[in-house]
Every structure is written in structure tokens, then in C-alpha cells.
Image (cartoon, helix red, strand yellow):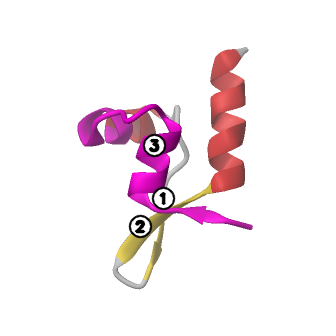
């Protein structure tokens, strides 16, 4: 399982803004991040599944 940093996630989503990404998380369009230490990470598999679901 690979985890994405916020910058990785932002890049994967076409350099979307921080506010837009967190709005998508709150609306359930993107998975919630996991806190490891003091940083937030997103599971790449969950992000890919969310993108695929939105593309349908």
C-alpha cells in the first residue's frame, strides 16, 4: 500500500488548490487522510478508486 503526501495528491488531481481538495474530502468525493506522526497521507488505492467512481 502506497501513501500520497498532500503535494502528491495535488499533483495527481491536476494541481487543484488546497481548499478545493479539502472540500472534496468533506463532501465524500475523496477519501479522508490518515495521520501518521504529524503529517497527513492519502492511501493511493483509495484515491484511485474515488477518481474512477467520479469518472463513471
- Element marked by disc 2: strand
First reached walking from the N terminus: tag 2 or tag 1: 1
Residue at label 1? 33
**Is residue 42 found left or right of 37 in the rendered image?**
right
* Residue 6 is covered by the magenta coloring: yes
Q: Quadrant of the C terminus?
A: top right
First reached walking from the N terminus: tag 2 or tag 3: 3
Q: What is the number of the mark on residue 10?
A: none
Please say if 56 is above or below 3.
above
Q: Residue at x 39, y 54 (%)?
A: 7
Residue at label 3? 11
Residue at label 2? 40
Magenta range: 1-22
Q: Nearer the viewer, residue 40 or 10?
A: 10
Please give the count of numbered marks on the rendered protein: 3
Query: Residue 11's spot in the image, x, y percent?
Result: 45, 43
Q: How many other residues sit within 10 Å of disc 2, few (<14), some (14-19) or many (≥20)?
A: some
Discs 1/3, front? 3
First reached walking from the N terminus: tag 1 or tag 3: 3
Q: Quadrant of the N terminus?
A: bottom right
**Is residue 19 found left or right of 36 in the rendered image?**
left
Amino acid at each position: 500500500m502506497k501513501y500520497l503526501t498532500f503535494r502528491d495528491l495535488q499533483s495527481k488531481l491536476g494541481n487543484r488548490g488546497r481548499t478545493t481538495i479539502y472540500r472534496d474530502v468533506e463532501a465524500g468525493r475523496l477519501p479522508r487522510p490518515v495521520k501518521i506522526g504529524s503529517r497527513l497521507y492519502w492511501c493511493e488505492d483509495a484515491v484511485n478508486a474515488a477518481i474512477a467512481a467520479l469518472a463513471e
